[in-house]
Structures are given as structure tokens and as C-alpha cells.
Image: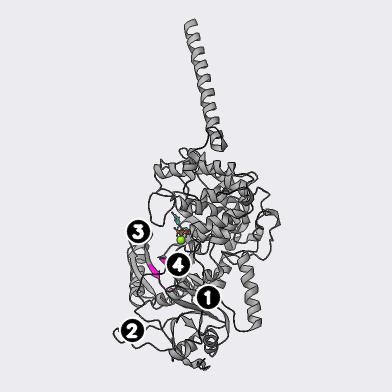
Amino acid sequence: MRTATSDPSSLLLSPPPSRQQAAMAARVGLVTCLPLCAQVRGRFLDSLHRHLSSPGTAILKREEPPAGSAEPGLQEKSNNKTFSEVQKERREQAQRSILISCPKKVPEKKLLKHLCQHGEITNHFFFESFGIHAVIEFSKKESIASLQDATFIPRGETEFPIPFKSRFFHLNLKNPSNQTSDGMLVQCSNQSSPLNADLIQTLCNAESVEGQIITLMRTLQITEENIRLRYLSCSLIEDIAAAYFPSCTIKPFGSSVNSFGKLGCDLDMFLDLDDIGKNSATKTAGPFLMEYQVKSVPSERWATQKILAVIGECLDNFGPGCVSVQKILHARCPLVRFSHQASGFQCDLTANNRIAMKSSELLYIYGSLDSRVRALVFSVRCWARQHALTSSIPGAWLTNFSLTIMVIFFLQKRSPPVLPSLDYLKNLADARDKCIIEGNDCTFVSNLDRIKPSENTETLDILLCQFFEYFGNFSFNKNSINIRKGKEQNKPDSSPVYIQNPFEPALNISRNVNESQLERFVHLARESAWILQEDKGRSSKSSSHPWGLAALLQPSVSNKSKAKKPGRGPTGEAVRKLLESIKADSSKHSAATREERTTSTQS
Ligand code: GTP
Ligand code: MG
């Protein structure tokens, strides 16, 4: 018998209990639920559909091509939002949102009705990370203050709660026995990356290699809800940092926002204190200039370390849901690393890292320019991870950032180019785009509509194969990769791989990579080019074994290649050409030597 009361006040909200100190959820599941009224639901589903059709950024108007076709000329050009517009919109959305840890069985309708007392709800969804959580988005910020006024600090029995009033709540049922039968087990769709075997199977079912590449991106990319959760997590941390620095902002950067984010990727956060400084630039009339009394330290790095140390301490002591806080202050880029248990994100909080923010914007621009860019980057990143060419642990391997720059460079090198050089983007910039950071010119156009679409019509399968062929034969010993020029240049030092930092020309972003990692990369790239060449024209219908991209993600890629006949495929072709040119060179050389000998004998 259903005994649950329909009184929405039977739900109690409190900040999450401090005993939530278990290890963090590595994987997060999310589920989207229907918002309150049909009109809102219509709006929401509409926007969700739009976002999922070009996910990752949720903003792109230049659409992905349908599976199996690349139509680079057909992308819509107008109404593309700039990176800053997107960031602003998302941040504002996050500031109107709250996070609630819920009981296993959530009486969803009652919860929404209960929360509606504080204002209109425009959106909500549930996800799983150490229990069920809800993200509720109000239409106005004021609703949150009203809810906070009606929320209790829990009374601990064995532990003493630190009375910190955040936007992260815990939902209690007043009469659990009455209400559990009323609550539904919320179905949480799994938003973590699929298991490898499932991914391979999905890829094998695709129609073509191009279809596989697009499927891979759609399967792995971060979802609309995941993006919202990332911005909300930053916003929650911002509330804590604002206790010390009221006008600070915490912005996500890196793959959470650059359109190349994969489910499960870390959440890079940037503590921006610039707005605090901005006010002091205001000129006032009169004979005096008022300044704040401040403490000073010998360098900006020192200041960053001090600020991060304090915020790290705050997160550790008062941050609801923040666990395993590590202050890594002596790194090249000082940071606070922690797990945001409630969202399931591994977070890296940095400050004074404006160039990384600008790099994220640049990657976002490149990812938005042509639908093939993101698809290729996802395939290459996934391939590299599968073969342990990249890792989540720092070491002598390539990073996802370096790999993305390599894909961009390769696409700049196509004929006609798929992507323009950074210098070209700089030439299109207007006065508002001007940006100098620490003496480095980081100017480039922000308005996507000003960039001419590419005339290159190569399909994704060709581009992927060519990527491997290109880097399988790249002169890493002589040349550096430079996306500013869109051309390789002489290497300025002897690092095995030299990828010029787009905004700090004197820096090599892959200086950590050693010879043996480079050798593995080159070897696997060659083998992969060969496999794709072999699998040309194959489809799910003609193959009983993993084929195309699925074959590249198999650990057996190098074993498979060992069985290949010499002289076949692109690598074989490259090796054959190399041998021929050596042979030709040596015969020229011996002819010349012979000639020399003859001449000297004659003389
Ligand atoms: P994931 O591996 O999915 O997290 O990719 P990511 O792009 O977020 O990379 P990561 O978390 O390692 O770094 C975050 C951001 O910092 C990158 O997107 C870059 O903008 C920047 N970054 C990372 N490595 C370097 C580097 O070596 N040099 C410079 N200048 N910036 C870097
Ligand atoms: Mg990252």
C-alpha cells in the first residue's frame, strides 16, 4: 500500500554530511529527467538535441557531417558563439544551479515540487557518483538564497559539522519508511567511457572506417550534462575561494572546454584574480590616488603559491565533497589537485595560468572550424591511450595536448589545408582580440564567422591513414612542429620531439618525450597506417574480425604487423622507397668515386 504523503515539506535539505570521505567515484553516470512543465520540457529537449548533435562544446553551429560522409563545405557559418560567450553563458547557468546528494530512491516529482517553492526550475538531471545526485537549475539565482535560508546544518552524533553553507545539499526524507515505496530508483544512464570490448564491438558494427571514426567520437565525448556538471563544480569551488577573494572566478579550461573532452577526463580549473585588479585601474578625480594596503611578495609565482596554499587548505578543511587534496606548489605550474567526490571529477586547480586558458580557446576554434578535426583528434587520442603512448601519470610520453597539436599541424599540411595556420588566425583578429600575456602575443580571431571554410574534401578514413603515414615518416630528428606557421621548421635543440608551444615560441611542449617513446610512436603509426591501408573499403559486412579503426585499438596491432609480408602497405612502400633512394645514392656515390678515381688516375 502506498502510504507516502504528498506534502513536499516532508523532504529535508541539509549540507552533505561530512562523513562522505570515501574514495572518489572514478566514473560518473548521469541521467536526464523531464523538467516540470511541457513548455520548459520542450525548450529543454530542443536545446539538448541541438547540443548532442554537436556535443563537447554544446555551442557549435558548424555541424558534424552525418556518419559516413564528410561535407566540409556544408557547414553553417552564422551564429557561431565565441569561446568567451560560451564560457559566460555556461558560468551564469552554473551560478543558478545546485547539487543535491539524494537517497537511493528519490521521489522525483515531490522533490521538484518542494524545490519549486523557492523559484522556477528550468532544468534538472540525476547522475551517480557515490550515490545518486541531482543537478537542479533554477531560472534565478535568488532561488538559491531562499533555499539556503530553509536549509539546516546537520547535527552530528559522533562528528562535529563545520557550518559551511554551500550550494551542495543533502536530501533527507523526513519519514523514510513512508516514502521509500513512493520513491523511484532513478535510472542513471552510464556516462563513463564504455568498456574497451564494447567499444570495439560498436566500431566493428559501423559501415565504414569513416563511420567508425564518427561513432568513436560520439561514444567518448563528454555529454551536455557532463559539461554542465563541470561548470557547476567550478562554480562551487569558486564560492569557497570567494571567501578570500570576493571577485575571483574559477573557470574550467583544457579538454573540459576545448571541444576535445572525453568522458572521464580531468577537470582543469583556473583561478582568475584579474577582475580584482581591474577595479584599481579606474581613474578617480581629485588630487589623491587611493590604493589598497596589501602585503607583497618577491614574485608572481610566490604570490600564486601562497594563494593556492590557502585555497588548498580551505578545500581540505571546509570544501564539501572535496577529498584527497594535494598541494603541488613547487611544480612548474603550481596547482592544487583534489577529487571532487560529488561530481566524480579529478580536479587540478591552477592560478596565473592565462596562457593555458588561451590555448584552450585556440583548440576550441580549431575544433569548431571543421567537423573532421574533433573526429580525428578523438581517434588519435584514443589510439594513443590504447597503446600506452599517453598516460594519466606524468612521464616521458606524449600528452593529449601535444597529440592534438600534432593533428592540427597535420591538417594544416594537407593540400588544400583543412586548417589555417595560427598566423593566419592572428591576421584576421580585430582590436578586441588583441591579447598579450607575459610578453607573449596570444592574439587570434575569436569570431568563427570570419574564417573561410576549407576547400579540402578528403574523407576521415583517408585523413586518419595519412596522419599515421605522415608521422610514421616525419623527420623528428631534423624538424619541429609549428602550428603558428603551419610548417615544419629546423629543430632548435636535440630533444627527440620538438612541438613549439603556440604562444611561447621558446618552449617545447613535448620536451619530456624520450627517444624510446618516440620510437614506439613512430612504429605504431607506421603499423596503423599499414592496417588502415589493408582494410580500405572493408565494412562490418565483409569482416568477422576487428577491422579498420577497431583493429587499430586492439593490443595486437604490432603482433598483427609482424605477420605482414615485407614491401606491402604504405610503410612497406616508404621503406622500399627509402631503400631505393639509398641504393640510388650509393650507386651515384660509387659512380662519382669511380669517376674521381678515374680522374685522379688520369691526372
Ligand atoms: P586531458 O588529457 O584530456 O586532460 O587533456 P587536456 O587538454 O585537458 O590536457 P591537460 O589536462 O594535461 O592540460 C590542460 C591544458 O593545459 C591543456 O589543454 C593546455 O591548454 C595546457 N597545457 C597542457 N600541457 C601543456 C604544456 O606542456 N605546455 C603548455 N603551454 N600548455 C599545456
Ligand atoms: Mg585536462
- Where 502 falls versus 190 (above or below)? above
Inspect the magenta stretch and tell me whether residue 333 lies in it: no
Which residue position holds label 3?
Answer: 331
The label on residue 187 is: 1
Residue 562: percent from the left, percent from the top? 48, 38
Magenta residues? 338-348
Secondary structure at numbered mark 2: loop
The residue lying at 48 percent from left, 67 percent from top is 252
User: Is ligand 2 within 8 Å of the beta carbon of the residue shown at mark 2?
Assistant: no
Q: Are marks 3 and 4 in contact (CB under 8 Å)?
A: no
The label on residue 501 is: none
Question: Which amino acid, mark 1?
Answer: Gln
Q: Nearer the viewer, mark 1 or mark 4?
A: 1
Inspect the magenta stretch and tell me whether residue 347 lies in it: yes
Q: Nearer the viewer, mark 3 or mark 2?
A: 2
Q: CA distance from mark 1 to mark 4?
A: 16 Å
Question: Which amino acid, mark 4?
Answer: Arg
Badge 3 or badge 2: first in the primary sequence:
2
User: Is ligand 1 within 8 Å of the beta carbon of the residue shown at mark 4?
Assistant: no
Crowding at dot 4, Cα within 10 Å, few <14 / some 14-19 / many 20+, comes out as some
Badge 3 or badge 4: first in the primary sequence:
4
Q: Is residue 216 left or right of residue 439?
A: right
Q: CA distance from mark 4 to mark 2?
A: 28 Å
Image quadrant where residue 125 sits: bottom right
Crowding at dot 3, Cα within 10 Å, few <14 / some 14-19 / many 20+, comes out as few
Residue closer to the observer: 32 or 85: 32
Residue 248: percent from the left, percent from the top? 44, 73
